[in-house]
């Protein structure tokens, strides 16, 4: 079946609906499959990556008024898209963590899966699983660490060139309305220092497989709303089965 088309030949809403229904369809089929032969964890990562990319582009095209709900801080009790504050185990980015921030951090983690294979093995952007006792995939860990290059400080942010580091910090300060300066570290290199310690923005979330499936299904349902000819732009109906 062909995708629903929005003005401008956009198919994102139709894609989101199909992606959400694909996930539901597989879950229904998997009920009769042995647990060790199910691949819903891999499927949800594939579906979620596409949905998060669409979501990020949607946010980029919104005006400030339309973005208001996305700028809300994450609550302890989930009220939107199955996203919970308790998923976040570490966040050193400035300011309150919002829905928009969460979406972008997890999208970066899934879309740029690197590994900390260089000393000193600092946390690097990417995702992995947290092994459990069952031998099955139970929990995913997502890391967004933009100043680290495969385990070591990126040369844009730690360098003997003070002007280069300052340029990067100026952009970061403008984006987050913060104030970081390039200072000499113990190795004689310039980098951001905060509270007398080297500063690196870092986001880490740990989400159970069930939690991840819930996020994917709810985001798919939200992003598919424009397929309704009479949609008022506000009311969210259950479209994903």
Image (cartoon, rainbow, N blue to C red):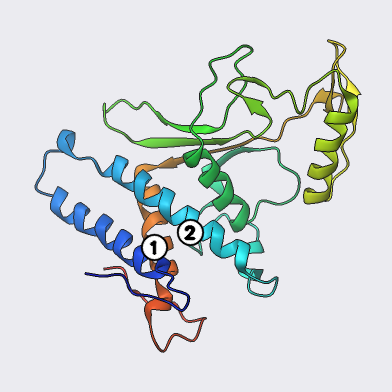
**x and y, in percent, of residue 194 in the image:** 84, 30
Q: Secondary structure at mark 1?
A: helix
- Left or right: where does residue 136 sit relative to residue 200? left
- Which residue is outermost to the front? 8
The residue sitting at 44% across, 67% down in the picture is 223
- Which image quadrant: the N terminus? bottom left
Report crowding for label 1: few under 14, some 14 to 19, many 20 or more residues within 10 A (C-alpha).
Answer: many
Mark 2 or mark 1, earlier in chain: 2
Q: Secondary structure at mark 2?
A: helix
Which residue, given by chain and number where applicable, does mark 1 sit on?
A: 220
The residue sitting at 78% across, 49% down in the picture is 176
Which residue, given by chain and number where applicable, does mark 2 sit on?
A: 54
Q: Is residue 190 above or below residue 165?
A: above
The residue sitting at 65% across, 58% down in the picture is 73
Q: Is residue 192 above or below residue 72?
A: above
Q: CA distance from mark 2 to mark 1?
A: 10 Å
- Left or right: where does residue 40 sit relative to residue 151? left
Q: Is residue 5 above or below residue 36?
A: below
**x and y, in percent, of residue 151 in the image:** 60, 20
Q: Which mark is residue 116?
A: none
In front here: 67 or 13? 13
Report crowding for label 2: few under 14, some 14 to 19, many 20 or more residues within 10 A (C-alpha).
Answer: some
- The answer to the question of whether label 2 and label 1 lie on touching residues, with beta carbons closer than 8 A, is no
The residue sitting at 42% across, 77% down in the picture is 6
**x and y, in percent, of residue 180 in the image:** 87, 37
Q: Is residue 73 visible?
A: yes
Q: Is residue 74 visible?
A: no
């Amino acid at each position: 079946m062909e995708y629903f088309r929005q003005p401008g030949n956009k198919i994102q809403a139709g894609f989101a609906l199909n992606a959400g229904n694909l996930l539901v369809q597989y879950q229904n089929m998997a009920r009769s499959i042995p647990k060790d032969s199910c691949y819903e964890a891999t499927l949800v990562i594939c579906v979620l990556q596409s949905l998060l990319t669409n979501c990020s582009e949607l946010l980029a095209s919104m005006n400030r008024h339309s973005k208001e709900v996305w700028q809300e801080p994450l609550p302890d009790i989930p009220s939107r898209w199955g996203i919970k504050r308790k998923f976040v185990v570490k966040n050193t980015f400035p300011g309150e963590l919002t829905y928009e921030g969460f979406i972008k951090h997890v999208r970066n983690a899934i879309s740029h899966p690197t590994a900390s294979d260089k000393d000193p093995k600092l946390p690097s952007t990417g995702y992995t699983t947290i092994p459990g006792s069952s031998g099955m995939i139970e929990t995913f860990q997502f890391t967004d660490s933009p100043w680290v290059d495969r385990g070591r400080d990126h040369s844009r942010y730690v360098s003997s060139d003070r002007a280069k580091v300052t340029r990067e910090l100026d952009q970061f300060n403008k984006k987050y309305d913060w104030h970081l300066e390039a200072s000499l570290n113990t190795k004689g290199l310039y980098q951001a220092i905060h509270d007398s310690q080297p500063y690196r923005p870092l986001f880490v979330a740990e989400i159970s497989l069930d939690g991840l499936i819930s996020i994917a299904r709810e985001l798919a349902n939200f992003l598919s709303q424009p397929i309704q000819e009479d949609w008022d732009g506000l009311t969210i109906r259950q479209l994903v089965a």
